[in-house]
Image (cartoon, rainbow, N blue to C red):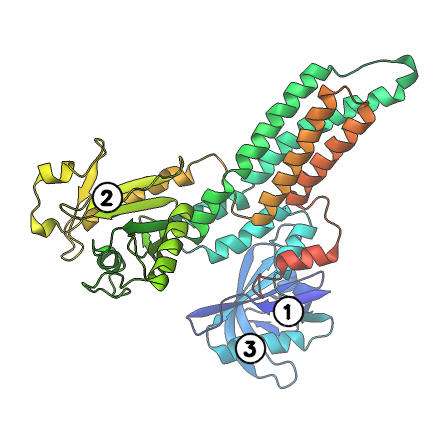
Amino acid sequence: MNIAAISTPSGIGGIAVVRVSGPSAISICDKVYRPFKAGNTLASRKSHTLTYGQIIDPESDEVIDEVVASVFRAPHSFTGEDVVEISCHGSLYIQQRILDVILSVEGIRLAEPGEFTRRAFRSGKMDLSQAEAVADLIAATTAASHRLAMSQMKGSISRKLDGLRLQLLNMTSLLELELDFSEEDVEFADRSQLLSLAHQIDYEVTRLASTFSAGQAIKNGIPVAIIGAPNVGKSTLLNQLLKDDRAIVSPIQGTTRDLIEDTITLGGYLFRFIDTAGIRNTSDQIEAMGIERSLRAAERAHIIILLSEPKVPFIDFEPRPDQKVIRIINKSDLAASHDETKSLMSDDSPIIHLSALTGEGVAVLEQHLIELARPVESQGDIVLTNRRHYEALNTAHDYLLRVSDGLTQQLPGDLVAEDLRAVIDSLNSILGQSITSQDTLNNIFKNFCIGK
């Protein structure tokens, strides 16, 4: 069946694109398309050519718009089918009229969300991980999230998994070959070498899975928790970073009792700042709940801004090994001496002096945040952003542990081979090579926009 949809976002713009795909896409469009140059029908045009003409209503012969029609012939198109993309003026009325006259032709229907990309997957133009990256690319709001989506769409995950699957298939083949010669008691695969290979593959699988946290941070915003004692300027600093009065600022201790979150983009990275309640001993039950939430937010954050002020010690906080801590002395406009600042530190950790009130020194903090974000993105050649991929890799890891145990315990080759096949199936599911359920595919593509 042929499908059509408006592929540009809803709204008024200079131009819009109506996309048509299917075995009869070109002939269907020819029924509503009139070229300015006689004989330049779309059916006569070569692939990847543009033709200037008009879209008409075939019933009334009314001209709806002057357009440029792009022809892409199978299999050299996004979907792998014949595709026509009609570039028209961005009027909402024009877009809808063009779509309506195309859908009035027999043999075509409105595309479902993500159906063009789904057809690209079905025709082998991309694997499932690349198809999912298309959605991430559309949703990318920063340079960093765009880089990750482009890398995945170009097949970075596919290439990595293909190498692992080839090694697993070789292991499985050797073990299954032994079954054909079981009566002769022939061993084709050296168990110690297979065990070493299983450990190597498991290392790669777990390393790739470990990048998911960083991928989520880049995709959804790197969480930065601002923590410190009451009244050291946490809310003022948040407002200064956001360039907005997002948090209430008051000299009264305990003003911030709940978490306040907002995001900004710095250096191509999205940061999700979390203003927290001042950490102190308190008998106020509501404030104590806010402090507890603050500590939990700090535990989840990738970056901690540990904030204090002259003559006020930093709060005791033990970061995770993978957490980065920025120590800041606020209220530099009060001109505290360097010696007073050093007395607050238990080590020689570098600190940043700034004034959240005046903005002095905030640019230094912003640059430091950008520098800390770069290692998050560069944890490896590939950074996972998709939870489905993460869960599939964890499943593969579990089966690889069973493979290692089976080889160590000298279990029969058929039992080990069964677990190896389960590992391969888990990796295949990331690429869509073992997914046959329509419900599963529908769930994956349901969040795509119509027209993509």
**Disc 2/disc 1 C-alpha distance (Å):** 69 Å
Q: Nearer the viewer, residue 30 or 337?
A: 337
Hey, which quadrant is residue 106 in on the image?
A: bottom right
Pick out the residue farthest to the right.
183
Residue at 40%, 38% (x, y): give it.
320
Q: Position of residue 361 (x, y in %)?
A: 16, 48
Q: Nearer the viewer, residue 38 or 89?
A: 89
Helix, strand or loop status at disc 1: helix
Q: Position of residue 373 (x, y in %)?
A: 35, 42
Hey, which quadrant is residue 72 in on the image?
A: bottom right
Question: In the rendered image, which residue does mark 2 sit on?
Answer: 314
Name the residue type under label 1.
Cys
Which mark is first along the chain, 1 or 3?
1
Residue at 85%, 13% (x, y): give it.
186
Which quadrant of the rendered structure holds the C terminus? bottom right
Hey, which quadrant is residue 420 in on the image?
A: top right
Name the residue type under label 2.
Phe
Helix, strand or loop status at disc 2: loop
Nearest-to-viewer mark from 3 and 1: 3
Q: Which mark is residue 29?
A: 1
**Disc 3/disc 1 C-alpha distance (Å):** 15 Å
Q: Which mark is residue 96?
A: 3
Q: Is residue 434 above or below residue 78?
A: above
Q: Position of residue 9 (x, y in %)?
A: 49, 68
Label 1, residues with CA under 10 Å away: few <14, some 14-19, many ≥20: many
Name the residue type under label 3.
Gln
Q: Is residue 279 above or below residue 196?
A: below
Q: Is residue 170 left or right of residue 199?
A: right
Q: Nearer the viewer, residue 331 or 364?
A: 331
